[in-house]
Image (cartoon, grey):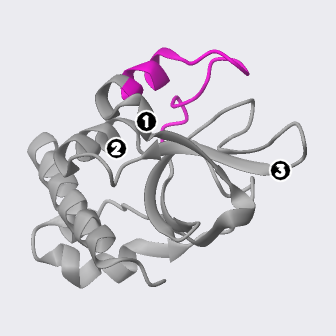
Amino acid sequence: MAKYFDETLEFLRDFLTDFGSIISDEKEEGFDTLRGEMVDENLNALIAPMAKSAGFIQAGDLVIFKYKGDDYIVLICSARGGHGLYQSHNGNMLLSGFKLNESQTQVAAMVVNSLYKNEAIAFSDQTKESKVIQGVKRVLGPSNFRTFLMIDVVSFNEIQIVQTPKKF
C-alpha cells in the first residue's frame, strides 16, 4: 500500500467501520472484513493498485490517491460521457468525483452504501447534473465535488469493498 497521511488512514478506518455497521444492520450477511478491529487487520487487503485507464475506472468506484501532495478518498462519478475518466477539450485526462475524506465518516458511509459500484452516479448528458449528482452534492456539500487532472494523480488505488460469502 502506498504511504498516505495518518489522518487519511484514520478516516478510512473509521469510514470502513461505519460502512460495515450500515451493511450488517441492513443485510443478514455482513462484510466480515469491515467489522470493528477487523478493519485494521484487513486494511492493506482492501486497498489495491488500480490502472489509471478508462477501461478500469468506472462511476461508483471508491479510490484513494495523492494529488498535488494531498490525500483524497473519492467516490468516482461519470461526467462528459466518460465512465469516470474522460478527456478535456484540450486533451487532458480528467477524473471527477466526490471527496469523502472531508465529510463525516457516517455520512460518507451512507453515500457509499447507496452508490458503491453504481454507474447511476453520472451526469445525465455532457453538461446537466443528474438528480443523483444533485442529491449527493446536497448531502456532502458542493465543495466536495471535484475534478482531478490525472497527470497529477499518484499512488492511485482502489478501495475494494468485497462482501464475504455467508458460511453455512
Residue 162's x, y, as percent? 37, 62
The answer to whether 158 is drawn above or below residue 21 in the figure is below
Q: Are marks 2 and 3 in contact (CB under 8 Å)?
A: no
What type is the residue that disc 3 sits on?
Asn
The mark found on residue 143 in the picture is: 1
Is 122 positioned to the left or the right of 137 in the image? Answer: right
Q: Are marks 1 and 3 in contact (CB under 8 Å)?
A: no
Judged by its main secondary structure, the magenta piece is: loop
Rendered residue at 34%/44% (across/down):
112
Q: Which residue is mark 2?
A: 112
What type is the residue that disc 1 sits on?
Ser
Q: Which residue appears farthest toward the right when viewing the image? A: 90
Image quarter in which the C terminus is found: bottom left
**What segment is highlighted magenta in the picture?**
117-137
Callout 3: SS: loop
Which picture quadrant has residue 136? top left
Mark 3 neighbour density, 10 Å: few (under 14) some (14–19) many (20 or more): few
Nearer to us: label 1 or label 3: 1
Callout 1: SS: helix
The residues tagged by marks 1 and 2 sit, at their Cα atoms, a distance apart of 18 Å
Residue 75's x, y, as percent? 46, 47
The mark found on residue 42 in the picture is: none
Q: Which residue appears farthest toward the front when viewing the image? A: 69
